[in-house]
Amino acid sequence: MIVLAVDVEKQLGAFKLGVRFEAAGGATALFGPSGSGKTSLVNMIAGLLKPDRGSIALDDTVLFDAARGINVPPHQRRIGYVFQDGRLFPHLSVRQNLDYGRRMSGRPQDAKDLERIVALLDIGHLLGRRPRMLSGGERQRVAVGRALLMGPRLLLLDEPLASLDAAHKREILPYLVRLRDDAGIPIVYVSHMPAEVRRIATTVVRLDAGHVAAAGGLELLTDADADLLA
Amino acid sequence: MLDLTAAEWTAVELSLRIAVVATACALPFGIAIGWLLARKNFWGKTVLDGLVFLPLVLPPVVTGYLLLISFGRRGPVGEFLYDYFGIVLSFRWTGAALSCGVMGFPLLVRPIRLALEAIDCKLEDAAATLGANRVLVFLTVTLPLALPGIIVGVVLCFARALGEFGATITFVSNIPGETQTISAAIYTLTQVPGGDAAAGRLVLIALALAFAALIASEWLSRRAAIRFHGE
């Protein structure tokens, strides 16, 4: 079943992005070298960047449709977004960061929900701390938790491991795999690292210079992709 | 030595009341204009920027005189305020609060603007994806992150309002019990023979208030910093 249908065009300076893909449940990787337009694309899905043309639909909701003049603002899209740099709120504790999405939507507090996600990501011992006191890996786990606790219909992960060293990457990857299998929320995972994509993705969309070069299963990752690691 | 007469106490009380009211009334405008200048590009931005900072470079007497001809009973704004709301500002302590607020305004706006410019807009994007509309983003992310700058602006504006002399005396004169602040009272006392002792007492009060404001701002800024970044 198609969960996310994207068909967008956007001129970004000299760079032209024109991408069309569909994602089912599970984890879809947007895979490609730096500068292939991956982050711009997820920003459009989240509503932070407005496409020039095209449409974006999630389940049976139209989030964006240029022809019909529809553009749902980001705060109404209910799309969880884990940024490359975490973007935790520095003036709030970890607990308050995790609780932010619920507070903004005015939903009642759900201790079970919090408990489940805190356990899933193993961040219980961090709740009282400030983001500044966290390691890179801890920060990204809290960012994932914050996005999950808003009750998203879709989770966008934009190179969530890019700012981490190899040891921290190994630390956080199992959590992401668990997330894919347990949370039941479709995931769009942006990465230029074949090793990560192999571990997490169920479907792969290969981007190159702002266009879809290929879409399919993990077999799309060839040995040549090892070069991208450089 | 600090045995103040009733008239001197009145001057101290008036000064504080005027400075507090001036700062409190200026603050919402200061945040709004600081935000406009930091975040928006619009026609006339340079003019607004200049207008806000004018009181800092104009002779205070000129600012006071401009207030007098516009907010005086027969001035265009003053007449409007009196006819429609029955408000009189000239020669009243509220007028003193207006002139002090105007004089302190540039000092209020500048740190707020700088603080807002320093905020990473990406954090506001993150808040939006988490379901916060624009107003909530401003209240829960932008404003708290700008708090150190707001504190600095408030303290500077308050201190300026407390010490304001030129614009205030030009606009609302020097009426004991109504518009005679500490500064105006000291000025009056130095003009009469034998006023030195009383002037000295008020000078000490002014010193104490200035120190208290500095210590308070230091304490508030440190608390804000701890809230942000941990100890």
Image: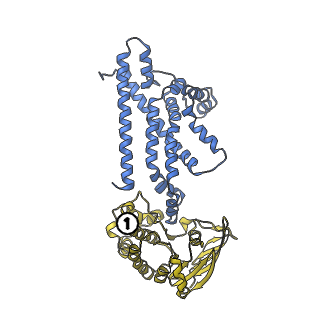
Question: Numbered disc 1: what chain?
Answer: A
Name the residue: 35% across, 30% down.
B208
Left/right placement of residue B73 relative to residue A89 reads right
Q: Quadrant of residue A131?
A: bottom left
Left/right placement of residue A88 relative to residue B30 reads left
Chain with colour blue in the figure: B
Figure quadrant of the C terminus of chain B: bottom left
- The location of residue A141, given as percent across then percent down, is 40, 71
Q: Quadrant of residue B207?
A: top left
Q: Amino acid at mark 1?
A: Ser
Name the residue: 44% across, 49% down.
B147
- The location of residue A206, given as percent across then percent down, is 58, 80
Chain A shade in the render: yellow
- The location of residue A42, given as percent across then percent down, is 56, 71
Q: Is residue B22 above or below residue A3?
A: above
Name the residue: 64% across, 40% down.
B47
Question: How was the colour assigned to the protein in this rendering?
Answer: by chain
- The location of residue B136, given as percent across then percent down, is 50, 57
Q: Which residue is mark 1?
A: A135
Q: Nearer the viewer, residue B9 or B43?
A: B43
Q: Nearer the viewer, residue B94 or A93?
A: A93
Q: Nearer the viewer, residue A9 or A191?
A: A191
Figure quadrant of the N terminus of chain B: top left
Q: Is residue A3 above or below residue B75?
A: below
